[in-house]
Image: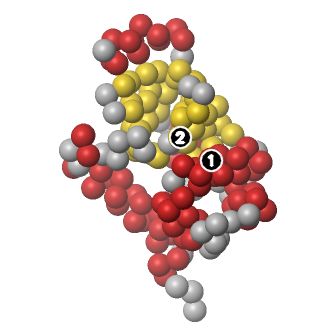
Amino acid sequence: MTDVRRSPSFIWRIMRFLNRHVMPKTRPEVKLKGLVLLLTTTGRKSGLPRQTRLQYEEQAGVIYIAAARGQDADWFRNIVANPHVEAQINERRFHGVAEPITDPARIADFLELRLQRHPRMVGAMLLLHGLPMRPNRANLEQLAAKLALVAIRPDESHREGIKQCEG
């Protein structure tokens, strides 16, 4: 008999509930500063703006976000259809071009970075995936094969808009 609390569908339902119902009601100054961004993609079917709150890491001016649902995540599929996105981190808004990444080695590198920066939080997430809190590289690559990653680079043609939103 499987533990319902460890089933992927149960975890996704909890995460979806939190993203849809709890995060929008949280005051902006409390919304996990430095951990969560607001990503706006264009719906691949509707063409309408779609907003999703996601955890991120920034390294060398590039924003990285992982799709725990892999290539099945709606926001990831929207990016594959149209890589032009808008992101908001705290009060900073910018347009960018998103690069979908599915290479397990690159995703494992990202997981290692996240684990270094946020060992307890990411360790707990890894436990939900059935990994130890301190996994080895092989464990991370095994999990990475199920995930997807996106690298967002600010779009230089929108540089003026970035400065206005930041200042």
Q: Is residue 158 visible?
A: yes
| The disc label shown at residue 57, or none | 2
Dot 2 or dot 1, earlier in sequence: 2
Q: What amino acid type is highlighted by mark number 2?
A: Glu
| Vertical placement of residue 84 versus 132, above or below | above
Give the residue at x 58% y 33%.
Answer: 59
- Using residue 53 as the reference point, say whether residue 84 is left or right of it: right
Find disc 1 in the rendering and name its residue.
113
Query: Which of the image's four quarters has the C terminus?
Result: top left
Residue 157: x, y in percent? 52, 8
What colour scheme has been applied to the protein in the rendered image?
A: secondary structure
Residue 109: x, y in percent? 70, 47
Residue 44: x, y in percent? 52, 35
Q: Is residue 50 visible?
A: no
- Using residue 80 as the reference point, say whether residue 56 is left or right of it: left
Query: Which of the image's four quarters has the N terminus?
Result: bottom right
The answer to which of 1 and 60 lies nearer the viewer is 60
